[in-house]
Amino acid sequence: MAQTAPRAADLPKLDADQPAATISGGHLVAKALKNEGIDVIFTLCGGHIIDIYDGCTDEGIKIIDVRHEQVAAHAADGYARVTGKPGCAVVTAGPGTTDAITGVANAFRAESPMLLIGGQGALNQHKMGSLQDLPHVEMMKPITKFASNVVTTERIADMMAMAFRESFNGAYGPSFLEIGRDILDAKIPLESAVIPRPGHYRASTKSIGDPNDIEKLADILVHAERPAVLFGQQVWTTRGTDAARAFARTLNIPAFMNGAGRGTLPPGDPHGFQLTRSYAFGKADVIVIVGTPFDFRMSYGKRLKAKTVVQIDMSYATVGKNRDISLGLVGDVGAILAAVTQAASGRLGNGASKRQPWIDELRAEEKKLYDARLPTILNDSIPIHPLRLAYELNEFMTENTVFIGDGGDVVTSAGGVVQPKSPGHWMDPGPLGTLGVGVPFAMASKLAQPEKEVLCLFGDGTFSLTGWDFQTMMRFNLPFIGVVGNNSFMNQIRAGQIMKYGKEKGDIGNYLGDVKYDLFAKMLDGYGEEVRDPRDIRPALQRARESGLPSLINVWIDENAFAPGTMNQTMYK
């Protein structure tokens, strides 16, 4: 039977003296977070922010309390990368907020959408020197897409919607809100609170830019003889994996991947290449760069010698920065790739097949480079060569394994060997090069997708930065396989010092000592194991997998074996 709206006479009568429903600022924060689909916050407690905890508890939002605010910010960044939703960290004022700055800056350079909420003293103590008072907003402005204080309780949810909206404007990034203790604790009539309706304050971001430029790029690619494409992290950011795969396969274009773009094409894909990027970019007549800026990782674009260089990016500010380009397209990179594929496919003719000799040439070069390093990769020497460690990790990984790289030289070694089996299964700090993201990224990944295995490769210097939150992984039952490539040095810096100043000055300021990280894991009731022989790596990894615990496999690697990428760093030349 159809239901009818209740008549006024049927509604309960309200006593004129009955107080109106009220809500606190902290509960408004929680409602705004729930509007955004956020189901977890990362935090370290402080007196300024505890009403947010009370609100999150009522709204069913999980509270993950960590041991350092940098970890909270990194975990919020990692959560955004894994889920595609914004991450959120909540920290107290003063040192709580300044401790989180590195994590926010890392998210800024990595184009990761997250919100940091920082506490502050009461407005009636403004400029009086209240506990932990600092100019947070001014400090955060250069490393966020939006930074503001919130000056009334009524505006909390509205300001949070504004901050989240800016995080998704163009290329993604972090936002910051400072909310004072009195603003959070105050209670206001519920009817006076501004609470945007979930899903009703967003515009579509799936733009393809100028349709004429889609046609231009399609025409360029149809006539190219030796094209190449680089799929960067924005392919994953926009969840454009399927479009990127169709682009490479339909147009028969060799593809390279970097950052979170790794895994776009699976290992063994006939269009996926790993070792021949310099070779291909040196001989290509058309290069398409997708979702990667011309920064230091791309030699600021100077090594792109092709006659035609095309850049596709989410940000207008990135396109054409540091070098001239032949064509630039701004919009959702997945949508652009899909549109170009559609536009080109109808006019390819035999254009795709005529590029097969180019594909075959790169494949032969790829095999040549792989065979040349094979003796090193399979070397049984002790101490263990870092390339051998990377090889064993790659062989151990499954399609369900998320790989996290957190280190210098050891992760640089892994970058040329490890190939994630699925999209979204590679995580690294990004262009800021921040050390210490490993444990917080593992935390975020396991919380967001508990069905997936997390494998994290640390340098020994890196693990020391945020490793105490291994205990947080234990408290919240978040198993992961941690591997410490231990050479007792900050070895990437050591390599540079040896090149620049000679071996006698190579160890200054970078020697860490011989730390047994396996015992650290055991101390915290996790799984720990020490490995000195390369033939023992795989069995140790398997035992860590079967333990069902947070684990650390301490692998002693050769301190005098450096990654090729480390030795090619220009800053030391």
Image (tube, grey):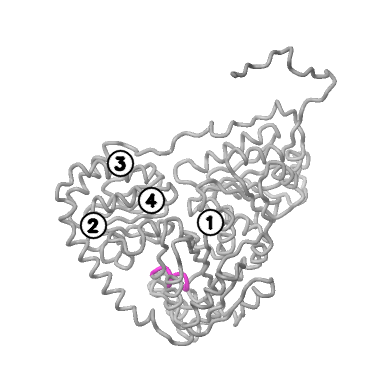
Residue 190: quarter of image? top right
Name which residue lies at 20% across and 44% down. Answer: 219
- Tell me where residue 539 appears, x and y as whole percent: 51, 78
Q: CA distance from mark 3 to mark 4?
A: 14 Å
- Tell me where residue 478 appears, x and y as whole percent: 62, 61
Q: Nearer the viewer, mark 3 or mark 4?
A: 4
Q: Nearer the viewer, mark 3 or mark 2?
A: 3
Q: Nearer the viewer, mark 4 or mark 1?
A: 4
Which comes sooner in the sequence, label 1 or label 3?
1
Q: Which residue is mark 1?
A: 106
Q: CA distance from mark 1 to mark 2?
A: 32 Å
Q: Nearer the viewer, mark 4 or mark 2?
A: 4
The reply, left or right, for residue 59 in relation to residue 442 is right
Which comes sooner in the sequence, label 3 or label 2?
2
Q: Nearer the viewer, residue 496 or 552?
A: 552
Q: CA distance from mark 1 to mark 3?
A: 32 Å
